[in-house]
Amino acid sequence: MRLEFASYVRKPTARVPEGYRLHRYRPGEEGDWIQLLNESREFGVWNTGKLRSMILDSLIPNSGVFISDSKALIACAACCSVSSFLPYATANYALVLPEHRGRGLGLIAMAAVIDSARDAGFPGVVLQTDDFRIPAVKTHLKLGFRPDITIRPATATRWSAVLAATGNLGKEGMV
Ligand SMILES: CC(C)(COP(=O)(O)OP(=O)(O)OC[C@H]1O[C@@H](n2cnc3c(N)ncnc32)[C@H](O)[C@@H]1OP(=O)(O)O)[C@@H](O)C(=O)NCCC(=O)NCCS
């Protein structure tokens, strides 16, 4: 079961640390993206068909965001136009490989896709996450996302537990 976030977001201001480069997906980079998603083991097994159906077919222009070190992609995030969440854009598949975590790269990648969605004219960004993804929830809260309990009020109790795990219980409101 998943949880919903609502829009909207603060303007994020983090800078890419030295040794890393932020760039955008361009056609021809599908293999590198698939390799990163598979290496992370976060979102199941990926191939060309899954990348196309889950991301590329609905990708908002300029909204496939990569971060590389000197050798390869080490982080990514995307923002898509998903009919069930329109008029909002849907952020998804953000990850940083474990050895590169702790530097704020996830927040930087997410901030970049949010900016792209805004540039593309979407009035806000939503995303879904899982209860166990505490680092991700911390990142999303920093970007201004708020737990959305309007769709499933029963998730309020679960949200309380998740917010407590992030150290944000009582500080961050739900919508
Ligand atoms: C979410 C993610 C991209 C963030 O990467 P990152 O920018 O390197 O951030 P970190 O993983 O270092 O963690 C973010 C915050 O969570 C904190 N954190 C990490 N593990 C934690 C834990 N077990 N409990 C509580 N807080 C934790 C970190 O200290 C950090 O807090 P800070 O910003 O106050 O220092 C990365 O953790 C990741 O790839 N996770 C797996 C994939 C995933 O869940 N994607 C999101 C799908 S919705």
Image (tube, rainbow, N blue to C red):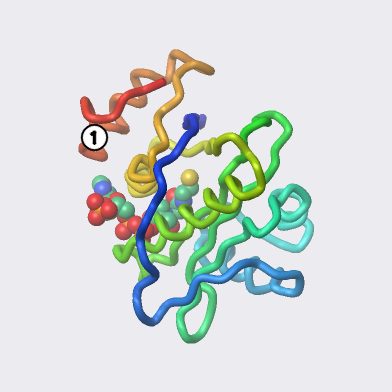
For image coordinates 26% across by 40% down, the residue present is: 166
For image coordinates 35% across by 79% down, the residue present is: 18
Of helix, strand and loop, which one carries label 1?
Answer: loop
User: 103 or 52, which is in the foreground?
Assistant: 103
Residue at far bottom of view:
70
Q: Tag count in the figure? A: 1
For image coordinates 57% across by 47% down, the residue present is: 92
Q: Position of residue 45 (x, y in %)?
A: 63, 58
Q: Position of residue 63 (x, y in %)?
A: 62, 56
Q: Position of residue 104 (x, y in %)?
A: 34, 61
Check disc 1 and report the residue beneath it.
168
Within 10 Å of disc 1 (Cα), the crowding (few <14, some 14-19, many 20+) is some
Left or right position of 34 against 106: right
For residue 143, which quarter of the picture?
top left
User: 88 or 40, which is in the foreground?
Assistant: 88
Left or right position of 79 against 54: left
For image coordinates 53% across by 18% down, the residue present is: 151
The C terminus lies in quadrant: top left
Q: Is mark 1 within 8 Å of ligand 1?
A: no
Q: Amino acid at mark 1?
A: Asn
Left or right position of 52 against 90: right
30 to 6, vertically: above or below: below
For residue 88, which quarter of the picture?
top right
